[in-house]
Image: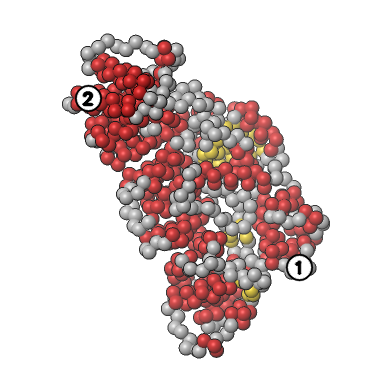
């Protein structure tokens, strides 16, 4: 996140991985803009790919890679700032598989599975356990659970990377997995970042005294990334005759604390329009002059500043007013301060020393993002939201930022305001000091709070596109609560099903959650959408399908029993037909397992058992007419279903195993 006088910090990243310096612009429009692919998958993959390109491999990266390949587990140690967490993510990215998901483990957080729970790991998963900032108690508790976690990882052919606290103790039997990494040469890191920023290699390869002075000693990699970003911005605003040495000198100057300069400037600007323009330029730095002008006027109106009464033609023009605040308009009409990174110092000054402005800035930001101006592009809106978010987070006011996002979504919520609310919450989730607070706050909103306006859709977006990228289990639970409370739309339900379908583990967890719920009509509606028999019977990349697992069978039977017992036939028949069609597709034991589950669920309807069996049989007859592969196989399936119903009622002999089921492994069980 941007800090006054410093640019972008990259440390212990959570959620989205911010792999380079500069502002974070995230596409958060997948729910507000229709998409045929869950956005969290795209975001996770894009962020990890970029991280792999920008990271200079630390010393011993090869050893860590070899240990992970050999054992499925590696424990990374190293000094803070050496790139431990980034290296961990890159190592896991190299084992990305379609059958598994990336998952950052959060031991001790609410609604997270414990590290010794075997349900935590699915085949091919990539697991990150970042304990770099853990205290002695947390590290000791995690160490106790590592053997069970490693066993599950080994059995599932998954991969686990642990980032341990520096100088933390490690049990002797885990020493084999420990690899201590060391920071790569600072000059190599700087040049890699400059290359990623598009700086010509003939520029950054030449020696420079400023660079030598900056890299003297050991600097954390995040500081090097910050400096590279300053060089990039210095280059963008430099005169045509300036080259690499001048860019670096400008970047060095920008690292200095400018608070005294800004304090003196503000003291000399006594008029409200001057200060309004100063605040506006700092918050919309780089925006077009038209946007700056209109936004400054909006700020004055937001603050109820009286009109000056001077005739329009006697007003100072914008060029003169910008000169008074040390800003200027570039050739493209975009406004910037003359000094690099001056904008962050101005923002910090007004936030620190005029706290009464803070509530008004939220209303002003909402007005600016709603401006009907061709120059108010998404990057301008996102940059404005991020800058106000940084001030809230920098001063420990995550609650204020959360309330602001909620208000933007609840009061006259335009599309632009909804996107601004999503971006504000994204900033909170990305901040290492506040990410846990925001995850808990989002849980409370989804599960317990009354949501006004369009705020529920903002939460759907946040869970599906942001939280799911690295914490899919938490996203699943929050989307489940939103789907239960959803009225008049199915966005939360669709996002929930999309997320669950991305992983067998998540689908298993959703079915278990539904089976343990009160099985109310909303829960049953979720179940009918989530019980697609195709993924349930799919064996791709695994030895047995989900429908063959005892725990999944129990969950499915429990939920189908509640559906058949309490919902009208018209509500469940299309879903039962889908199961019957899948059973007719020649999937052997997995197909007959679907029939057995339906019959077992109906058999539990004791008082209405005959009526439910009759409805199930009638549904099978109707399914014959809609079978994708014609009626022949469906008729056979209906006969098989009838036979199983007869057996359940004690009217016929137990079914003999079919050739497909007879060849099934002895470990496969039926309900």
Residue placed at 45% from the left, 15% from the top?
665
Q: Which mark is residue 240?
A: 1
Residue placed at 52% from the left, 36% from the top?
101
Q: Earlier in the sequence, mark 2 or mark 1?
A: 1
Question: Is 326 left or right of 28, judged from the image as shown?
Answer: right
Q: Quadrant of residue 667?
A: top left
- Report the colour scheme: secondary structure
Q: Position of residue 219 (x, y in %)?
A: 69, 53
Residue placed at 54% from the left, 44% from the top?
42
Q: Is residue 20 visible?
A: yes
Q: Quadrant of the C terminus?
A: top left
Could you say whether the residue bearing mark 2 is in a helix, strand or loop? helix
Q: Is residue 448 visible?
A: no
Q: Position of residue 346 (x, y in %)?
A: 58, 70
**Callout 1 environment at 10 Å: few (<14), some (14 to 19), or many (20+)?**
few
Find the residue positioned furthest to the right: 207
Q: Position of residue 235 (x, y in %)?
A: 71, 63
Q: Quadrant of residue 97?
A: top right
Q: Which mark is residue 273?
A: none
Near-viewer residue (172 or 305): 305
Near-viewer residue (615 or 326): 615
Q: Quadrant of the N terminus?
A: bottom right
Location of residue 113 with respect to 405 vertically, above or below: above
Residue placed at 44% from the left, 77% from the top?
301
Location of residue 450 with respect to 274 vertically, above or below: above
Q: CA distance from mark 2 to mark 1?
A: 83 Å
Could you say whether the residue bearing mark 1 is in a helix, strand or loop? loop
Near-viewer residue (258 or 466): 466
Of badges 2 and 1, the one in the foreground is 2
- In the rendered image, which residue does mark 2 sit on? 614
**Callout 2 environment at 10 Å: few (<14), some (14 to 19), or many (20+)?**
some
Question: Is 349 left or right of 186, judged from the image as shown?
Answer: left
């Amino acid at each position: 996140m941007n800090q006054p006088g410093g640019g972008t910090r990259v440390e212990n990243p959570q959620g989205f991985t911010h792999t380079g310096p500069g502002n974070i612009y995230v596409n958060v429009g997948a729910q507000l803009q229709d998409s045929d692919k869950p956005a969290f998958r795209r975001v996770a993959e894009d962020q990890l790919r970029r991280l792999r390109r920008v990271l200079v491999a630390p010393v011993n990266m090869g050893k860590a890679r070899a240990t992970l390949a050999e054992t499925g587990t590696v424990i990374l140690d190293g000094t803070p700032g050496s790139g431990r967490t980034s290296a961990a993510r890159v190592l896991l990215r190299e084992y990305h598989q379609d059958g598994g998901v990336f998952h950052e483990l959060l031991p001790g957080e609410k609604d997270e599975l414990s590290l010794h729970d075997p349900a935590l790991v699915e085949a091919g998963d990539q697991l990150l356990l970042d304990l770099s900032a853990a205290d002695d108690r947390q590290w000791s508790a995690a160490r106790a659970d590592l053997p069970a976690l490693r066993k599950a990882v080994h059995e599932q052919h998954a991969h686990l990377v642990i980032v341990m606290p520096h100088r933390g103790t490690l049990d002797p039997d885990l020493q084999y997995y420990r690899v201590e990494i060391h920071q790569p040469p600072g000059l190599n890191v700087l040049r890699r970042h400059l290359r990623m920023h598009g700086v010509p290699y003939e520029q950054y390869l030449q020696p420079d005294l400023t660079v030598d002075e900056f890299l003297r000693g050991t600097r954390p990699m995040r500081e090097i990334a910050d400096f590279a970003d300053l060089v990039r911005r210095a280059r963008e605003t430099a005169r045509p005759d300036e080259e690499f040495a001048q860019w670096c000198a400008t970047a060095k100057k920008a690292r200095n604390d400018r608070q005294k300069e800004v304090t003196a400037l503000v003291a000399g600007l006594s008029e409200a329009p001057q200060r309004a323009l100063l605040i506006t330029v700092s918050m919309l730095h780089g925006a077009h002059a038209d946007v700056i002008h209109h936004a400054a006027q909006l700020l004055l109106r937001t603050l109820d500043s009286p009109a000056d009464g001077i005739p329009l033609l006697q007003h100072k023009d914008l060029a003169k007013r910008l000169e008074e605040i040390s800003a200027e308009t570039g050739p493209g009409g975009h406004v910037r301060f003359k000094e690099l990174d001056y904008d962050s110092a101005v923002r910090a000054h007004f936030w620190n020393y005029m706290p009464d402005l803070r509530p008004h800035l939220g209303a002003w930001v909402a007005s600016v993002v709603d401006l009907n101006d061709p120059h108010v592009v998404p990057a301008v809106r996102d940059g404005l939201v991020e800058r106000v978010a940084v001030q809230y987070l920098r001063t420990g006011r995550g609650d204020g930022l959360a309330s602001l996002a909620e208000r933007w979504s609840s009061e006259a919520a335009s599309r632009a305001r909804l996107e601004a609310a999503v971006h504000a919450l994204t900033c909170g989730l990305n901040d290492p000091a506040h990410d846990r607070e925001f995850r808990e706050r989002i849980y409370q909103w989804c599960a317990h709070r009354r949501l006004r306006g369009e705020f529920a859709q903002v939460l759907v977006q946040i869970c599906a596109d942001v939280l799911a990228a690295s914490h899919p289990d938490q996203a699943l639970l929050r989307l489940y609560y939103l789907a239960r409370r959803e009225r008049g739309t199915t966005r939360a339900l669709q996002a929930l099903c999309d997320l669950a379908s991305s992983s067998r583990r998540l689908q298993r967890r959703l079915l278990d959650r539904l089976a343990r719920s009160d099985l109310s009509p909303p829960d049953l509606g979720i179940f009918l959408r989530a019980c697609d028999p195709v993924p349930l019977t799919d064996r791709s990349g695994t030895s047995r399908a989900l429908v063959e697992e005892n725990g999944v069978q129990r969950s499915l039977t429990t939920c189908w029993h509640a559906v058949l017992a309490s919902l009208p036939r018209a509500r469940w028949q299309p879903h039962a037909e889908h199961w019957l069609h899948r059973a007719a597709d020649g999937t052997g034991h997995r197909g007959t397992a679907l029939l057995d589950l339906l019959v077992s669920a109906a058999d539990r309807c004791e008082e209405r058992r005959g009526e439910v069996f009759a409805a199930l049989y009638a549904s099978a007859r109707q399914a014959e007419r809609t079978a994708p592969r014609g009626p022949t196989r469906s008729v056979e399936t209906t006969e098989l279903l009838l036979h199983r119903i007869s057996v359940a009622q004690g009217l016929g002999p137990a079914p003999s195993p079919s050739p497909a089921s007879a060849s099934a492994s002895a470990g496969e069980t039926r309900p």
